[in-house]
Image (cartoon, helix red, strand yellow):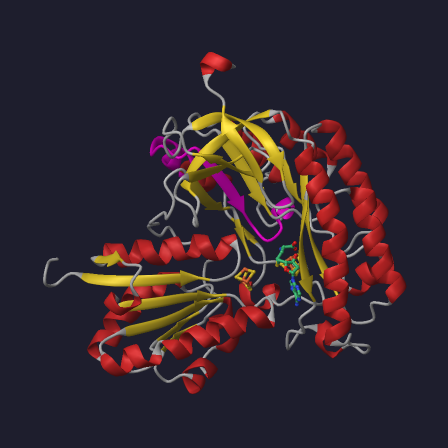
Amino acid sequence: MIQNEKFYFIQTYGCQMNQSDSEHYAGQLEELGYRQTDELTMADVILLNTCCVRETAEDKTLGKIGELKHLKDENPDLIIAVTGCMAQEWQDRLFKRAPHIDLVIGTHNIHTLIDLIKERQQKKEHYLASDMHVPAFHELPAKRFQKFFAWIPIMNGCNNFCTYCIVPYVRGREVSRPVQSVVEEVRRVADAGYKEITLLGQNVNSYGKDLSSHDDFASLLRAVDEIDGIERIRYMTSHPKDMNYDAIDAIAECHKVVNHMHLPIQCGNDALLKKMNRGYTVEHYMDLVDYARKRIPDLVLTTDIIVGFPGETEDMFMDTLQFLKRCQYDMAYTFMYSPRTGTPAATMEDQIPQEVKSSRLQRLMDVQNVYSLKKNQAMERHIYDVIVEGPTKNDKNHWFGRTTGNKMIIWENDGSAAIGDTVPVMVDKGQTWVLKGHIVHKSNM
Ligand code: SAH
Ligand code: SF4
Ligand code: F3S
């Protein structure tokens, strides 16, 4: 090891947007001459890129911040930065809570990292950057953490103000990135050998509404679909209020756009949807799903559901269970409602007791698991193209990859495929969370 080498450690909490932001933090640190390490004790800069969407996310981060104190005691030159949504929400309260933090950087201030590190090296003080009145997109270098999969932010912020959600407060208003800028970045990653991209935004279906051009999500998909070299185009997250037939047509017609749609419903009762300020009804949602299934016959559909929103009665919850049966998702991400200070729902009457929330969550998962299993079992004895991601965490002899529908398949590594290859895999067994299979070789196809 070279004597003067300097290292950074990054931990990311929360959504894909944060993953992408972390890559832009890392890109700047690399430019400053730092290299990445997985060892906390080796780091000269520790950066926690945080989430505050639920209390559990905050608790995890606060626990981690606590763990870092002894490292700071041992090495006063260590720089600890807390960034992202929780930094934006907490601001300088984080310094009060944990004085060993050096930098607090909000969601719109990623570009300030290098200057703040330099200032901190000059003078041991607390530095806060949380101004939201700055451009939402900066052309920053990215150090991509994955070799074949690239995150491409297409917009920042959210205008929807769902009554439970803190994201609009910490991410600001929607700002779309110009098509040209998105296209150029996709061309660059295609030239660099990336095979799969994910277009990112809190509500990708409202892409372009703030632009002076006539571009919208459908036209963006069509523009990106023409770029050579990319195999798969994913997009996250769709919103049922703004998703429309035009976008579904584009998804169906673009060859590289995948057959996976993540369309959060949140709950299956209209009165509750209204209270959540979601802006659609169950029937409108179902109409979109019916059309999407008609246009994209092998559609893989996933969703987000919150249980225990204020005022959720047993009957309303039953509507949600009923909707799971009706819609038959491939998978659902399920959450217990977590009150977020400053959001309207946090002060609504009829907050649901914790034990009711957890029992509803369990009942919800029990119902969904039946359909997840059924969907995965229906894939048995079919062959899917999979991009190889490498060995599984727990067992290096088993490798995994994903289908275009974002289903994870695991197989026993026979040495025939390299990471990043696209290979045909036959599904032998569909389980609730994962599929088991084997690579199909040309000779026995
Ligand atoms: N923009 C996306 C999702 C953002 S947050 C969308 O609108 O769908 C991801 C998910 O977290 C949400 O879909 C919602 O299901 C959940 N979530 C957001 N705020 C929450 C809260 N206060 N408590 C529990 N779950 C929440
Ligand atoms: Fe939150 Fe709703 Fe915006 Fe999604 S659409 S980020 S749930 S406010
Ligand atoms: Fe969390 Fe912020 Fe994403 S609150 S879910 S990291 S936008």
Q: Is residue 189 magenta?
A: yes
Along the line of sight, the residue nearer the viewer: 134 or 370: 370
| Location of residue 13 with respect to 202 vertically, above or below | below
In this rendering, does residue 274 appear at all?
yes
Q: Is residue 144 magenta?
A: no
What residue range appears in magenta? 185-206
Q: Quadrant of the N terminus?
A: bottom left
429 left or right of 378 in image? left
Name the residue: 57% across, 32% down. Answer: 257
How many tags in the picture?
A: 0
Check the image and name the residue furthest to the bottom. Answer: 96
Name the residue: 85% across, 51% down. Answer: 322
Q: Give percent across and percent down for residue 273.
A: 80, 59
Check the image and name the residue furthest to the right. Answer: 315
Along the line of sight, the residue nearer the viewer: 108 or 274: 274
Q: Give percent across and percent down for residue 14.
A: 52, 60
| Location of residue 172 with respect to 141 vertically, above or below | below
Q: Give percent across and percent down for residue 348.
A: 78, 76
Name the residue: 81% across, 78% down. Answer: 349
Quadrant of ligand 3: it is bottom right
22 left or right of 271 in image? left
Name the residue: 40% across, 57% down. Answer: 22
Check the image and name the residue furthest to the left. Answer: 3
| Location of residue 346 with respect to 436 vertically, above or below | below
Please identify the quarter of the rendering in which residue 300 is found.
Answer: top right
Q: Give percent across and percent down for residue 352.
A: 78, 74
In this rendering, does residue 224 appear at all?
no
Along the line of sight, the residue nearer the viewer: 44 or 115: 44
92 left or right of 33 in image? right
